[in-house]
Image: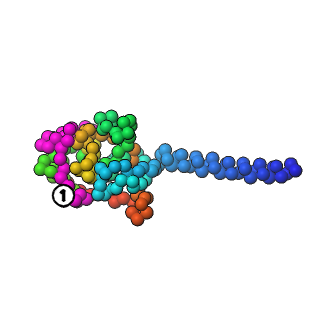
Amino acid sequence: MWRIFKIIGGFFLDIIETGVFALSIFVLIYVFLAQPHQVSGRSMVPNFQNGEYLLTNKWAYRTSLPQRGDVVIFHAPATAHCPTGGACDFIKRVIGMPSETISIRSGHVYINNKQLEETYLPPEYVTRGDAFLRDGMQISLGDEEYFLVGDNRPGSSDSRAFGPVPRKNFIGKAWIRYWPLSKLGVLEHTSYTI
C-alpha cells in the first residue's frame, strides 16, 4: 500500500516540478525577452489593424538603439490621455531621433529641414500638426527623446499631440504579428533615404 502512495506521490511531484519549471521559463521570457501586445484602436491603420496581436521584442533596445522606422510599444506619457483614464501602452512608429529637429509643413514631416519620404502611407494621408507640434512649428529633440507618430495620421494621438517620448518609456520593438494567422510573420523594418 505504501508503495502505491509513493508511486502516486512521485507522479504528482513530477507534474508539479514540470509545471514550476515551465512557469519559470515563461516568466523569464515574458519579463526579459518577449511580451504579447494587442493593437487597440486605429492609430496604425493601414499597416496594423485594431485587434491584431504582436509579439514585442523586449531585448532589442538593450543591445541596440531604436532606429527610424521601428514600430515600438511604449508606456504612454501622462499627457497622452489614455483611453482607459489610467496608464496604458501605445504602439507608434519612430520618426524623429535624438538631437534632430522636427517640423510639419504642407502635409509632410521634415527632419532637419528635409522631407521624410514615407512610402508605407497611402498618398491620401496628410500629416497635420496637433497641440504640441503645430503646422509650421519646429522642435528640437533631446539626447534621449524620440518623436513617435501613428501611421493613421488623421486618427492618431501621438508625439504631435503629447510631445517627444523618452527612451526609458520604451517597452520594446514590434517583432512578430501572430494574429490573425493570415498575417503571421516577422515585421519588416522600414528604411528611409534621409
Q: Specify how the rendered protein is coloured.
A: rainbow
Position in image of residue 51 (x %, y %) = 39, 54
Residue 24 relative to residue 98: left or right = right
| Label 1 crowd (10 A; few <14 / some 14-19 / many >=20) | few
Task: State the SS at label 1.
Answer: loop
Question: Foreground residue, 168 or 83?
Answer: 83
Q: Which residue is at a point 37% across and 47% down the rendered structure image?
A: 73
Q: Write the residue at 78% across / 51% down.
A: 8
Q: Is residue 126 magenta?
A: yes
Is residue 156 covered in magenta? no
Residue 48 image point, x, y percent? 33, 56
Position of 192 with respect to 78 (left or right) is: left
Left or right, 102 with reference to 66? left
Q: Which residue is mark 1?
A: 124
Magenta region, residue range: 119-145
Locate the C terminus by quadrant.
Answer: bottom left
